[in-house]
Image (cartoon, rainbow, N blue to C red):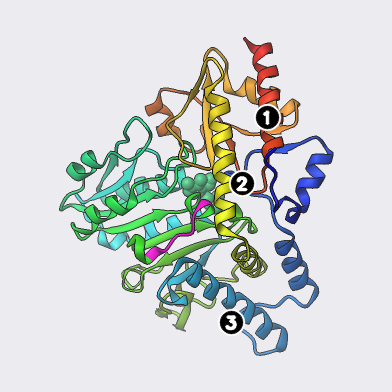
Amino acid sequence: MLSSPWRSDFPALAVMEAQGEVYLDSAATAQKPQALISALTGYYTSGAANVHRAQHASAERATRAFEGTRTKLASWLNAAEPTEIIFTRGATEALNLLAYGMEAHIDAGDEIAITALEHHANLLPWQQLAQRRNAHLVVLPLDKAGHIDLEAATQLIGPRTRVLAASQLSNVLGTQQPLHRLLPLAKAQGALTVVDGAQGIVHQRTDVRSLGCDFYVLSSHKLYGPEGVGVLYGRREALARLRHWQFGGEMVQLAEFQHAQFRPAPLGFEAGTPPIAGVIGLGAVLDYLGGLDQAALAAHEHRLHRMLVDGLAMRDGIRLLGRPDCALASFTVEGVHPADLSHLLTEQGVAVRSGTHCAMPLMGRLGVSGAIRASLAFYNDGADLEVFFCALDRALELLR
Ligand SMILES: Cc1ncc(COP(=O)(O)O)c(C=O)c1O
Protein backbone atom coordinates (compact mmCIF):
# COMPACT_ATOMS: atom_id res chain seq x y z
CA MET A 1 0.00 0.00 0.00
CA LEU A 2 1.32 3.43 -0.97
CA SER A 3 1.81 5.51 2.18
CA SER A 4 2.80 9.15 2.53
CA PRO A 5 5.82 9.87 4.75
CA TRP A 6 4.64 13.50 5.05
CA ARG A 7 1.12 12.80 6.29
CA SER A 8 1.94 13.27 9.96
CA ASP A 9 3.22 16.81 9.23
CA PHE A 10 -0.46 17.80 8.74
CA PRO A 11 -2.25 17.49 12.10
CA ALA A 12 -5.74 17.99 10.67
CA LEU A 13 -5.51 14.78 8.70
CA ALA A 14 -5.40 12.64 11.85
CA VAL A 15 -8.47 14.48 13.18
CA MET A 16 -10.30 13.97 9.90
CA GLU A 17 -9.29 10.34 9.78
CA ALA A 18 -10.63 9.79 13.29
CA GLN A 19 -13.93 11.24 12.08
CA GLY A 20 -13.92 8.90 9.09
CA GLU A 21 -13.19 11.62 6.55
CA VAL A 22 -10.91 11.30 3.54
CA TYR A 23 -9.79 14.57 1.99
CA LEU A 24 -9.59 14.62 -1.81
CA ASP A 25 -10.26 18.32 -2.37
CA SER A 26 -6.81 19.85 -2.13
CA ALA A 27 -7.20 21.72 -5.43
CA ALA A 28 -9.87 23.80 -3.65
CA THR A 29 -7.65 24.37 -0.63
CA ALA A 30 -4.88 22.35 0.96
CA GLN A 31 -4.55 21.16 4.56
CA LYS A 32 -1.91 22.98 6.58
CA PRO A 33 1.39 21.70 7.93
CA GLN A 34 2.37 22.06 11.60
CA ALA A 35 5.11 24.44 10.42
CA LEU A 36 2.41 26.95 9.44
CA ILE A 37 0.39 26.51 12.61
CA SER A 38 3.52 27.07 14.72
CA ALA A 39 4.50 30.17 12.75
CA LEU A 40 1.03 31.72 13.15
CA THR A 41 0.95 30.92 16.87
CA GLY A 42 4.50 32.23 17.23
CA TYR A 43 3.67 35.51 15.55
CA TYR A 44 0.47 36.14 17.50
CA THR A 45 1.93 35.10 20.84
CA SER A 46 5.13 37.11 20.50
CA GLY A 47 3.51 40.46 19.70
CA ALA A 48 1.54 41.43 16.61
CA ALA A 49 2.58 44.66 14.94
CA ASN A 50 2.01 46.51 11.73
CA VAL A 51 4.72 46.41 9.07
CA HIS A 52 6.74 49.22 7.46
CA ARG A 53 5.22 51.85 9.77
CA ALA A 54 6.81 51.94 13.20
CA GLN A 55 10.28 51.69 14.67
CA HIS A 56 9.44 49.76 17.86
CA ALA A 57 10.84 46.29 18.40
CA SER A 58 7.76 44.24 17.55
CA ALA A 59 7.17 46.27 14.38
CA GLU A 60 10.76 45.67 13.34
CA ARG A 61 10.38 41.93 14.03
CA ALA A 62 7.16 41.75 12.03
CA THR A 63 8.61 43.75 9.13
CA ARG A 64 11.73 41.57 9.02
CA ALA A 65 9.66 38.37 8.94
CA PHE A 66 7.21 39.82 6.40
CA GLU A 67 9.99 40.95 4.08
CA GLY A 68 11.73 37.63 4.70
CA THR A 69 8.84 35.89 2.96
CA ARG A 70 9.21 38.23 0.00
CA THR A 71 12.87 37.23 -0.30
CA LYS A 72 12.00 33.52 0.04
CA LEU A 73 9.36 33.80 -2.67
CA ALA A 74 11.77 35.57 -4.99
CA SER A 75 14.19 32.70 -4.64
CA TRP A 76 11.39 30.07 -4.77
CA LEU A 77 10.31 31.47 -8.15
CA ASN A 78 13.81 32.52 -9.25
CA ALA A 79 12.74 36.15 -9.63
CA ALA A 80 15.59 38.58 -10.27
CA GLU A 81 14.91 40.50 -7.05
CA PRO A 82 12.48 40.53 -4.07
CA THR A 83 10.94 43.82 -5.26
CA GLU A 84 9.38 41.83 -8.09
CA ILE A 85 7.09 40.11 -5.54
CA ILE A 86 3.80 41.81 -4.56
CA PHE A 87 1.52 40.47 -1.83
CA THR A 88 -2.20 40.55 -2.50
CA ARG A 89 -5.16 39.09 -0.63
CA GLY A 90 -5.47 36.11 -2.99
CA ALA A 91 -4.77 34.96 -6.54
CA THR A 92 -8.08 36.48 -7.60
CA GLU A 93 -7.03 39.88 -6.30
CA ALA A 94 -3.66 39.60 -8.07
CA LEU A 95 -5.41 38.99 -11.40
CA ASN A 96 -7.79 41.91 -10.79
CA LEU A 97 -4.79 44.09 -9.95
CA LEU A 98 -3.30 43.20 -13.34
CA ALA A 99 -6.50 43.83 -15.28
CA TYR A 100 -6.87 47.28 -13.69
CA GLY A 101 -3.15 48.00 -13.78
CA MET A 102 -2.95 47.38 -17.54
CA GLU A 103 -6.08 49.29 -18.43
CA ALA A 104 -4.22 52.26 -19.91
CA HIS A 105 -2.48 49.97 -22.42
CA ILE A 106 -5.72 48.64 -23.91
CA ASP A 107 -7.42 50.64 -26.66
CA ALA A 108 -10.65 50.04 -28.58
CA GLY A 109 -10.18 47.16 -31.01
CA ASP A 110 -7.22 45.66 -29.14
CA GLU A 111 -7.27 42.00 -28.20
CA ILE A 112 -6.85 40.19 -24.90
CA ALA A 113 -6.20 36.47 -25.30
CA ILE A 114 -7.17 33.91 -22.70
CA THR A 115 -7.75 30.18 -23.04
CA ALA A 116 -10.91 28.08 -22.99
CA LEU A 117 -9.98 26.43 -19.70
CA GLU A 118 -9.57 29.46 -17.46
CA HIS A 119 -10.90 29.63 -13.91
CA HIS A 120 -13.36 32.53 -13.52
CA ALA A 121 -10.56 34.36 -11.67
CA ASN A 122 -8.53 34.48 -14.89
CA LEU A 123 -11.50 35.07 -17.16
CA LEU A 124 -13.79 37.66 -15.60
CA PRO A 125 -11.18 40.38 -14.85
CA TRP A 126 -10.12 40.25 -18.56
CA GLN A 127 -13.69 40.04 -19.84
CA GLN A 128 -14.59 43.12 -17.81
CA LEU A 129 -11.45 44.96 -18.93
CA ALA A 130 -12.31 44.18 -22.56
CA GLN A 131 -15.81 45.56 -22.01
CA ARG A 132 -14.52 48.74 -20.33
CA ARG A 133 -12.11 49.42 -23.20
CA ASN A 134 -14.14 48.16 -26.17
CA ALA A 135 -11.50 45.53 -26.76
CA HIS A 136 -12.04 41.91 -27.87
CA LEU A 137 -11.61 38.90 -25.65
CA VAL A 138 -10.07 36.15 -27.80
CA VAL A 139 -10.48 32.61 -26.47
CA LEU A 140 -7.79 30.11 -27.47
CA PRO A 141 -9.33 26.67 -28.01
CA LEU A 142 -8.17 23.32 -26.62
CA ASP A 143 -7.33 20.03 -28.25
CA LYS A 144 -9.16 16.83 -27.28
CA ALA A 145 -6.80 16.04 -24.40
CA GLY A 146 -7.37 19.46 -22.84
CA HIS A 147 -4.18 21.27 -23.86
CA ILE A 148 -4.16 24.64 -25.60
CA ASP A 149 -4.23 24.08 -29.35
CA LEU A 150 -0.96 25.72 -30.42
CA GLU A 151 -1.80 25.77 -34.11
CA ALA A 152 -5.00 27.69 -33.43
CA ALA A 153 -3.13 29.95 -30.99
CA THR A 154 -0.62 30.80 -33.72
CA GLN A 155 -3.50 32.01 -35.88
CA LEU A 156 -5.35 33.85 -33.13
CA ILE A 157 -2.48 35.72 -31.45
CA GLY A 158 -1.67 38.69 -33.64
CA PRO A 159 -0.53 42.31 -33.81
CA ARG A 160 -3.57 43.56 -31.84
CA THR A 161 -2.93 41.14 -28.96
CA ARG A 162 -1.93 43.22 -25.96
CA VAL A 163 -2.20 40.59 -23.22
CA LEU A 164 -2.12 36.81 -23.06
CA ALA A 165 -3.39 35.31 -19.79
CA ALA A 166 -3.20 31.52 -19.41
CA SER A 167 -3.22 28.90 -16.68
CA GLN A 168 -0.24 26.70 -16.05
CA LEU A 169 -2.31 23.74 -14.83
CA SER A 170 -6.06 23.43 -15.34
CA ASN A 171 -8.09 23.19 -12.13
CA VAL A 172 -10.69 21.11 -14.00
CA LEU A 173 -8.74 19.01 -16.49
CA GLY A 174 -5.46 18.58 -14.61
CA THR A 175 -3.62 19.28 -17.87
CA GLN A 176 -0.30 21.10 -17.87
CA GLN A 177 -0.28 23.74 -20.55
CA PRO A 178 2.46 24.13 -23.16
CA LEU A 179 3.44 27.58 -21.90
CA HIS A 180 7.03 27.34 -23.12
CA ARG A 181 5.64 27.29 -26.65
CA LEU A 182 2.60 29.50 -26.11
CA LEU A 183 4.17 32.51 -24.39
CA PRO A 184 6.69 33.23 -27.18
CA LEU A 185 3.78 33.63 -29.62
CA ALA A 186 2.46 36.53 -27.54
CA LYS A 187 5.88 37.98 -26.84
CA ALA A 188 6.65 38.05 -30.56
CA GLN A 189 3.66 40.40 -30.90
CA GLY A 190 4.83 42.64 -28.04
CA ALA A 191 2.00 41.47 -25.72
CA LEU A 192 2.33 41.16 -21.95
CA THR A 193 2.06 37.60 -20.65
CA VAL A 194 0.27 36.54 -17.47
CA VAL A 195 0.46 33.02 -16.03
CA ASP A 196 -2.13 31.85 -13.52
CA GLY A 197 -0.04 29.48 -11.43
CA ALA A 198 -2.62 28.93 -8.67
CA GLN A 199 -2.71 25.19 -9.38
CA GLY A 200 0.59 24.80 -11.22
CA ILE A 201 2.95 25.95 -8.47
CA VAL A 202 1.57 23.30 -6.10
CA HIS A 203 2.81 20.42 -8.24
CA GLN A 204 6.01 21.77 -9.77
CA ARG A 205 8.73 24.21 -8.84
CA THR A 206 8.49 27.04 -11.35
CA ASP A 207 11.29 29.26 -12.58
CA VAL A 208 9.57 32.41 -13.82
CA ARG A 209 12.63 33.56 -15.73
CA SER A 210 13.00 30.35 -17.69
CA LEU A 211 9.23 30.35 -18.25
CA GLY A 212 9.68 33.84 -19.67
CA CYS A 213 6.41 35.32 -18.40
CA ASP A 214 5.91 38.96 -17.46
CA PHE A 215 3.59 38.14 -14.56
CA TYR A 216 2.96 35.01 -12.50
CA VAL A 217 0.20 34.62 -9.92
CA LEU A 218 -0.10 32.11 -7.11
CA SER A 219 -2.43 31.39 -4.22
CA SER A 220 -1.05 30.73 -0.73
CA HIS A 221 -3.92 28.59 0.52
CA LYS A 222 -3.50 26.06 -2.28
CA LEU A 223 0.24 25.87 -1.57
CA TYR A 224 -0.37 24.63 2.01
CA GLY A 225 -0.33 28.22 3.32
CA PRO A 226 -3.00 30.40 4.91
CA GLU A 227 -5.97 31.97 3.13
CA GLY A 228 -6.08 35.68 2.44
CA VAL A 229 -2.66 35.80 0.78
CA GLY A 230 -1.91 35.86 -2.92
CA VAL A 231 1.37 36.50 -4.68
CA LEU A 232 2.02 38.44 -7.84
CA TYR A 233 5.42 38.15 -9.46
CA GLY A 234 6.13 40.80 -12.08
CA ARG A 235 9.25 41.30 -14.16
CA ARG A 236 10.64 44.67 -13.11
CA GLU A 237 10.05 46.36 -16.48
CA ALA A 238 6.54 44.88 -16.72
CA LEU A 239 5.63 46.07 -13.20
CA ALA A 240 6.73 49.57 -14.15
CA ARG A 241 4.00 49.58 -16.82
CA LEU A 242 1.18 48.99 -14.32
CA ARG A 243 -1.04 51.80 -13.10
CA HIS A 244 -1.74 51.92 -9.37
CA TRP A 245 -5.14 50.50 -8.57
CA GLN A 246 -5.90 50.51 -4.83
CA PHE A 247 -5.17 53.63 -2.85
CA GLY A 248 -4.53 54.18 0.84
CA GLY A 249 -1.91 53.87 3.54
CA GLU A 250 1.73 53.04 2.84
CA MET A 251 1.42 52.92 -0.97
CA VAL A 252 1.89 56.66 -1.20
CA GLN A 253 5.10 58.69 -1.28
CA LEU A 254 3.56 62.11 -0.97
CA ALA A 255 -0.09 62.98 -0.33
CA GLU A 256 -1.73 66.39 -0.62
CA PHE A 257 -5.44 67.13 -0.74
CA GLN A 258 -5.57 67.49 -4.52
CA HIS A 259 -2.59 65.44 -5.56
CA ALA A 260 -0.50 62.39 -4.62
CA GLN A 261 2.62 60.57 -5.72
CA PHE A 262 2.72 56.83 -5.39
CA ARG A 263 5.44 54.38 -4.56
CA PRO A 264 6.73 51.98 -7.16
CA ALA A 265 6.27 48.20 -6.77
CA PRO A 266 6.05 46.36 -4.57
CA LEU A 267 4.77 48.67 -1.80
CA GLY A 268 2.89 50.90 -4.25
CA PHE A 269 0.62 47.93 -4.95
CA GLU A 270 0.10 46.93 -1.32
CA ALA A 271 -2.33 49.58 -0.08
CA GLY A 272 -3.47 49.32 3.54
CA THR A 273 -2.40 46.81 6.17
CA PRO A 274 -1.42 43.61 4.39
CA PRO A 275 -2.19 40.10 5.72
CA ILE A 276 0.89 40.13 7.96
CA ALA A 277 0.47 36.85 9.85
CA GLY A 278 -0.52 35.08 6.64
CA VAL A 279 2.56 36.29 4.78
CA ILE A 280 4.82 35.29 7.66
CA GLY A 281 3.04 31.92 7.76
CA LEU A 282 3.58 31.44 4.04
CA GLY A 283 7.29 31.97 4.62
CA ALA A 284 7.29 29.13 7.15
CA VAL A 285 5.47 26.92 4.64
CA LEU A 286 8.13 27.63 2.01
CA ASP A 287 10.83 26.67 4.53
CA TYR A 288 8.94 23.44 5.25
CA LEU A 289 8.37 22.61 1.57
CA GLY A 290 11.96 23.51 0.71
CA GLY A 291 13.19 20.93 3.22
CA LEU A 292 11.32 18.03 1.57
CA ASP A 293 12.84 15.61 -0.90
CA GLN A 294 11.38 17.05 -4.12
CA ALA A 295 12.07 13.97 -6.22
CA ALA A 296 10.42 11.64 -3.68
CA LEU A 297 7.47 13.98 -3.44
CA ALA A 298 6.97 14.16 -7.21
CA ALA A 299 7.28 10.37 -7.53
CA HIS A 300 4.69 9.88 -4.78
CA GLU A 301 2.24 12.31 -6.38
CA HIS A 302 2.77 10.65 -9.76
CA ARG A 303 2.00 7.17 -8.41
CA LEU A 304 -1.09 8.40 -6.58
CA HIS A 305 -2.32 10.15 -9.68
CA ARG A 306 -1.86 7.02 -11.80
CA MET A 307 -3.89 5.05 -9.24
CA LEU A 308 -6.66 7.62 -9.39
CA VAL A 309 -6.82 7.83 -13.19
CA ASP A 310 -6.46 4.07 -13.74
CA GLY A 311 -9.10 3.30 -11.11
CA LEU A 312 -11.58 5.64 -12.80
CA ALA A 313 -10.74 4.32 -16.27
CA MET A 314 -11.50 0.73 -15.29
CA ARG A 315 -15.06 1.55 -14.16
CA ASP A 316 -17.93 1.44 -16.63
CA GLY A 317 -19.74 4.57 -17.70
CA ILE A 318 -17.18 7.02 -16.30
CA ARG A 319 -16.10 9.85 -18.57
CA LEU A 320 -12.84 11.50 -17.60
CA LEU A 321 -12.68 15.16 -18.63
CA GLY A 322 -9.54 15.63 -20.71
CA ARG A 323 -6.38 13.60 -20.13
CA PRO A 324 -5.07 14.83 -16.78
CA ASP A 325 -1.29 15.05 -16.47
CA CYS A 326 -1.20 15.33 -12.69
CA ALA A 327 -2.86 16.44 -9.46
CA LEU A 328 -6.51 15.63 -10.09
CA ALA A 329 -9.17 13.98 -12.18
CA SER A 330 -12.61 15.35 -13.04
CA PHE A 331 -15.29 13.00 -14.27
CA THR A 332 -18.94 12.47 -15.01
CA VAL A 333 -20.92 9.24 -14.88
CA GLU A 334 -23.42 8.35 -17.55
CA GLY A 335 -26.97 8.76 -16.26
CA VAL A 336 -25.87 10.08 -12.85
CA HIS A 337 -26.11 13.68 -11.68
CA PRO A 338 -22.79 14.84 -10.15
CA ALA A 339 -24.61 16.42 -7.20
CA ASP A 340 -26.28 13.08 -6.32
CA LEU A 341 -22.98 11.27 -6.55
CA SER A 342 -21.16 13.86 -4.49
CA HIS A 343 -23.92 13.66 -1.87
CA LEU A 344 -23.46 9.90 -1.52
CA LEU A 345 -19.66 10.26 -1.41
CA THR A 346 -19.97 12.90 1.30
CA GLU A 347 -22.22 10.60 3.32
CA GLN A 348 -19.44 8.02 3.21
CA GLY A 349 -16.88 10.54 4.43
CA VAL A 350 -15.21 11.29 1.10
CA ALA A 351 -14.52 14.97 0.46
CA VAL A 352 -14.50 15.71 -3.27
CA ARG A 353 -15.80 18.72 -5.17
CA SER A 354 -18.80 18.68 -7.45
CA GLY A 355 -20.12 21.42 -9.74
CA THR A 356 -18.67 23.69 -12.37
CA HIS A 357 -15.37 24.34 -10.54
CA CYS A 358 -15.49 28.08 -11.29
CA ALA A 359 -15.10 27.31 -15.00
CA MET A 360 -18.62 27.50 -16.42
CA PRO A 361 -17.58 28.31 -20.02
CA LEU A 362 -15.26 25.28 -20.07
CA MET A 363 -18.07 23.06 -18.83
CA GLY A 364 -20.20 24.41 -21.68
CA ARG A 365 -17.52 23.56 -24.24
CA LEU A 366 -17.19 20.06 -22.79
CA GLY A 367 -20.96 19.66 -23.02
CA VAL A 368 -21.46 18.90 -19.32
CA SER A 369 -23.37 20.80 -16.66
CA GLY A 370 -21.01 19.77 -13.88
CA ALA A 371 -18.48 17.18 -12.82
CA ILE A 372 -16.94 15.52 -9.79
CA ARG A 373 -13.32 16.41 -9.10
CA ALA A 374 -11.01 14.34 -6.91
CA SER A 375 -7.76 16.18 -6.25
CA LEU A 376 -4.59 15.03 -4.55
CA ALA A 377 -1.79 16.36 -2.41
CA PHE A 378 1.44 14.69 -1.32
CA TYR A 379 -0.13 13.92 2.08
CA ASN A 380 -2.68 11.59 0.47
CA ASP A 381 -1.95 7.89 0.34
CA GLY A 382 -3.15 4.69 -1.26
CA ALA A 383 -5.63 4.07 1.58
CA ASP A 384 -7.39 7.36 0.77
CA LEU A 385 -7.93 6.18 -2.78
CA GLU A 386 -9.10 2.76 -1.62
CA VAL A 387 -11.77 4.42 0.53
CA PHE A 388 -12.70 6.69 -2.39
CA PHE A 389 -13.14 3.83 -4.85
CA CYS A 390 -15.13 1.70 -2.37
CA ALA A 391 -17.42 4.68 -1.71
CA LEU A 392 -17.73 5.38 -5.44
CA ASP A 393 -18.71 1.78 -6.22
CA ARG A 394 -21.28 1.74 -3.44
CA ALA A 395 -22.75 5.08 -4.55
CA LEU A 396 -22.97 4.00 -8.17
CA GLU A 397 -24.67 0.76 -7.18
CA LEU A 398 -27.38 2.84 -5.53
CA LEU A 399 -27.67 5.41 -8.31
CA ARG A 400 -27.70 3.18 -11.40
C1 LIG B 1 -6.59 28.01 -11.65
C2 LIG B 1 -7.07 28.91 -10.54
N1 LIG B 1 -6.88 30.22 -10.63
C3 LIG B 1 -7.26 31.07 -9.66
C4 LIG B 1 -7.91 30.62 -8.54
C5 LIG B 1 -8.34 31.60 -7.47
O1 LIG B 1 -7.51 31.52 -6.34
P1 LIG B 1 -7.87 32.27 -4.96
O2 LIG B 1 -8.95 31.46 -4.35
O3 LIG B 1 -6.64 32.27 -4.16
O4 LIG B 1 -8.28 33.65 -5.30
C6 LIG B 1 -8.15 29.25 -8.40
C7 LIG B 1 -8.88 28.73 -7.23
O5 LIG B 1 -9.52 27.70 -7.29
C8 LIG B 1 -7.71 28.37 -9.43
O6 LIG B 1 -7.91 27.05 -9.34
**Badge number at residue 388:** 1
Q: In front: 141, or 299?
A: 299
Amino acid identity at mark 2: Ala
- Residue receiving disc 2: 377
Circle 3 Cα neighbour tier, 10 Å, few/some/many (<14 / 14–19 / ≥20): some
Q: CA distance from mark 3 to mark 1?
A: 48 Å
Per the image, label 1 sits on a secondary structure element best described as helix
Q: Is residue 165 left or right of residue 288?
A: left
Where 240 sits versus 94, above or below? below
Q: Quadrant of the C terminus?
A: top right
Q: Relative to residue 236, is residue 10 drawn left or right?
A: right
Q: Secondary structure at mark 3?
A: loop
Q: Main secondary structure of the magenta part?
A: loop
- Relative to 5, 96 lies left or right: left
Residue 209: x and y in percent read: 36, 66
Residue numbers of the magenta segment: 203-208
Residue 246 rendering spot, x and y as whole percentages: 47, 66
Toward the right, the furthest residue is 18
Residue lying at 74% horizontally and 72% vertically, measured from the top left: 43
At mark 2, the secondary structure is: loop
